[in-house]
Amino acid sequence: MNITRNWFGPNVCSYRGVFCAPALGKSKWTVVAGIDLNHAGIVGYIPVEFGLLTDLALHHLNSNRFCGIIPRSLSKLTRMYEFDISNNRFSGSFPRVVTTWKSIRYIDLRFNNFEGCLPPEIFEKDLNALFLNDNHFTCTIPETLGKSTVSAVTFANNKFKGCLPRSVGEMWRLVELIFTNNELGGLPQSLSSLKKIDILDVPHNKLTGTVLENVCKLPSLFNFTVSYNYFSEESSACVSLGRDHVVLDDTGNRVAGRTKQKLAKECQPVVSRPVDCNKNQYVAVSSYSTPNSRIPKSKPLVQPHTKSKP
């Protein structure tokens, strides 16, 4: 598929994948307002000149073979509303340029090779959705998480560690939280404040102790996955979830009386060093630096619980 085959001549608005609209406040002018090159088979870098498209609001480049870093010149795109560069080969630290956009509502960075820590200010943006899964992010989650306005956020398949911040309980819009395959050591009781959440997935971490009873009682919950951790107990409220037509997957823990659990000796290295997130809150890493480059690992084939993109 050669989407750019008609990209020649001065009539840019006729280019396939380019969308134009009247300029805000200057209706006699026509500007490039959107670029949609999803699944275009393009190989290369985002050029610095993209920063000249200062009226760009929609930037969709998912499922191509773009690589390199996100240029700082994109900070000039002050009208940016949706930024989707998922399923490419971008690398380097978190593209901090996205935190400069005042109008941004949707950020999708999943399935790339970004690494390092998350800047705390990303959770202070007025976002509807944030997808960070299937990269190489590390560190703890910043305490500013609780300031986020997202209804869906995915951290799956990275290397986040420590405690999920207690401030997560302040995310009153949150419907979907995916933390599959990280190195979380504990969950805070404040999760029980998420009255709107319906999907809470935290499998394949290092979680210990008792599955939080008050989380199992959340009114909107219909999918709660805690499999392949090191939990040792479940309250009756959690055990009864299946009878209430709520999916509870507790496979691969060490809960007595439950099927398909780990052996005690498998759990000893983790359970001997439990983390209590309600007493000793981890301090989120707020420093932000470019990580050392390394050879990217292959991507796990795990998709988040979101609607597939066109």
Image (cartoon, rainbow, N blue to C red):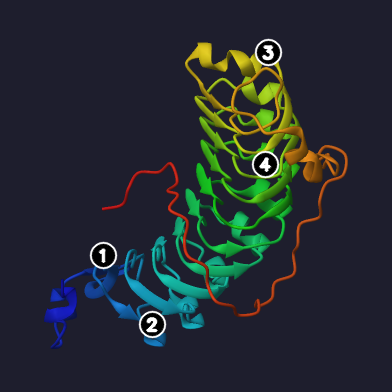
Residue name at image x 50 percent, y 58 percent: 134
C-alpha distance separating marks 3 and 1: 47 Å
Q: Nearer the viewer, mark 3 or mark 1?
A: 3
Q: Which mark is residue 45?
A: 2
C-alpha distance separating marks 3 and 2: 54 Å
Mark 1 Cα shell of 10 Å, populated few (<14), some (14-19), many (≥20) = some
Residue name at image x 75 percent, y 62 percent: 285
Which quadrant of the figure has residue 240?
top right
Residue 267 vertical position relative to residue 10 in the rendered view, above or below? above
Mark 2 Cα shell of 10 Å, populated few (<14), some (14-19), many (≥20) = some
Nearer the observer, 172 or 70: 70
Residue 46 x/y as whole percent = 38, 80
Give the residue type that dot 4 points to. Val
Q: Please report whichever mark, 4 or 3, sits nearer to the chain's N-terminal start.
A: 4
Q: Please report whichever mark, 3 or 2, sits nearer to the chain's N-terminal start.
A: 2
Q: Which residue is mark 1?
A: 39
Secondary structure beneath dot 3 equals helix
Residue name at image x 82 percent, y 37 percent: 278
Secondary structure beneath dot 4 equals helix
Q: Nearer the viewer, mark 4 or mark 3?
A: 3
Q: Determine contact: label 2, label 1, CB under 8 Å.
A: no
Q: Which residue is mark 4?
A: 168
Nearer the observer, 235 or 271: 271
Give the residue type that dot 3 points to. Ser
Q: Which residue is mark 3?
A: 236
Give the residue type that dot 1 points to. His
Secondary structure beneath dot 2 equals loop
Q: Please report whichever mark, 3 or 1, sits nearer to the chain's N-terminal start.
A: 1
